[in-house]
Amino acid sequence: MNRFAFVLAALMLTACGNGVPLPFQPETKTLATTELIRPKADASLALTSIGGMPGALGRDLAEQVAVQLRERGVPAFTDFANKSSWWLYGDYRPNPTRIDWTLIDPDGKGATNLSTPVITLTPRAGAVEIAAMAKSATPDLEKIVRIDPGPEMVPVAQAVFMQGVTGAPGDGRDALERAMRTELQRLGITIIDQLNRDTLVLSAQVGVTDAGANEQRVKIDWTLMTSNGKQVGTISQNNAIPKGRLDRTWGDIAWVAAQGAAGGLQELLKAVAGKPVDG
């Protein structure tokens, strides 16, 4: 069987709203891993290690609180601050067990205080207790630290959620998804099964139309989106095939299609990371 060659028709960036085409150049270099692109000039929340806690527990709790706040849309970090950052300090207190929080504005002139009840630390406290403390404190903290982070940024992603393939005849839905999962993983891009705020979503739309008595034209649009549905970019593939070739099994065609698109998707992930999402 002759291998079927897909042609990359277009790789368009929509993150900046300018539709600049990006040439397809396969790349094996993996992307830098981070959960969320750090804001460079906009407001963020900087957390310091929680006082009054033994060893590294104060640092671990601060990081867990930052993670919980980021999941709620607050740009909170323990390893980043700039001149626009707000600062959040916490101290663990017994009798009753609580954390006393102080929020300082970027100018250092205004302060907001809040106490959140937490579980009592035990000598053998570990990750489970720290996660529980962060989870109990975050809802109240969110009320005082709601910060406008500026324009939404595309995550610096090395993980993609596969939303699925639609419109494919025969076994194309499963064959294309299986092949793309394999190709992206080969390039060092993790496929995750649970969608979260900082994950990019990949979907594919297939269309097959008649192109003569003995041919059909197949078009595959691979689209990257943010978790809330804003489009980041699309790779389109378009080629003629013998009529009815995809009615039952895709076979090598699915693998060649995935190979042709995966490198371009990696380039797209690299190109749009940290840029504002249009719309």
Image: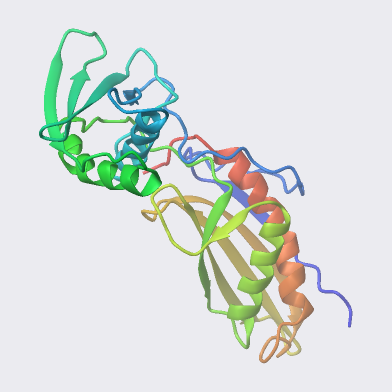
Q: Farthest residue in the front direction?
A: 123
Q: Is residue 71 visible?
A: no
Q: Residue at x 35, y 12 (%)?
A: 83
**Residue 259 vs residue 44: left or right?**
right
The image position of residue 154, as x and y in percent, is 47, 41
The N terminus appears in which quarter of the rendering?
bottom right
Q: Residue at x 81, y 68 (%)?
A: 5
Q: Is residue 39 above or below residue 186?
A: above
Q: Is residue 62 above or below residue 267?
A: above
The C terminus appears in which quarter of the rendering?
top left
Q: Residue at x 71, y 82 (%)?
A: 250
**Residue 262 vs residue 67: left or right?**
right
Q: Is residue 171 above or below residue 111?
A: below
The image position of residue 41, as x and y in percent, is 40, 20
The image position of residue 161, as x and y in percent, is 51, 60
Q: Residue at x 40, y 54 (%)?
A: 196
